[in-house]
């Protein structure tokens, strides 16, 4: 992205939808949204099944820092994100050291998907 466009605010929707919306809005920079294979470093990853509040499903979004496939076939990612601390605009970007399973039986859910940078 050209330097003069990097600070332009853009809305990519709710975290549960962000990977899909990014792939649709920036097809020259990102591939189609998928849950196949492994995400690349820099992929936008959406977690659509974080929870439900007042009947509305919500999710989360992060940036993939690293991915791997274990010898048993389990896929995993490490991410960086913001707002995981529920501090809104005062939230800080955090790189997580823990690995998240894809699909995840934990709070991240089973319908995890991403869009890889081209």
Image (cartoon, helix red, strand yellow):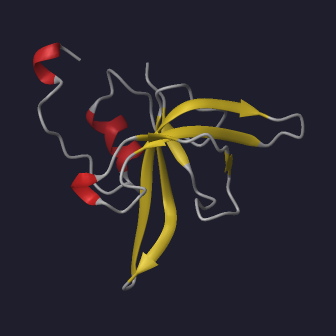
Q: Is residue 22 above or below residue 86?
A: above
Quarter occupied by residue 8: top left
Q: Position of residue 110 (x, y in %)?
A: 63, 59
Q: Position of residue 105 (x, y in %)?
A: 70, 63
Is 78 in front, or is 34?
78
The residue positioned 31% from the left and 60% from the top of the image is: 87
The residue positioned 53% from the left and 39% from the top of the image is: 79
Q: Residue furthest right?
A: 72
Q: How many marks?
A: 0
Horizontal arrangement in the rendering, residue 73 relative to residue 97 (left or right): right
Horizontal arrangement in the rendering, residue 44 relative to residue 7 (left or right): right
Q: Position of residue 101 (x, y in %)?
A: 69, 49
The residue positioned 82% from the left and 35% from the top of the image is: 70
Q: Quadrant of the N terminus?
A: top left
The residue positioned 32% from the left and 21% from the top of the image is: 28
Quarter occupied by residue 93: top left
Q: Quadrant of the C terminus?
A: top left
Q: Residue furthest bottom?
A: 54
Q: Position of residue 60 (x, y in %)?
A: 43, 56
């Amino acid at each position: 992205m050209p330097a003069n466009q990097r600070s332009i605010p853009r809305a990519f929707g709710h975290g549960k939808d962000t990977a899909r919306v990014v792939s649709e809005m920036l097809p020259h920079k990102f591939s189609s949204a998928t849950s196949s294979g492994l995400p690349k470093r820099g992929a936008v990853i959406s977690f659509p099944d974080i929870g439900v509040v007042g009947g509305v499903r919500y999710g989360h979004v992060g940036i993939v820092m690293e991915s791997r496939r274990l010898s048993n076939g389990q896929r995993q990612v490490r991410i960086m994100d913001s707002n995981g601390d529920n501090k809104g605009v005062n939230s800080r970007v955090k790189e997580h050291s823990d690995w998240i399973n894809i699909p995840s039986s934990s709070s991240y859910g089973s319908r995890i998907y991403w869009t890889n940078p081209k």
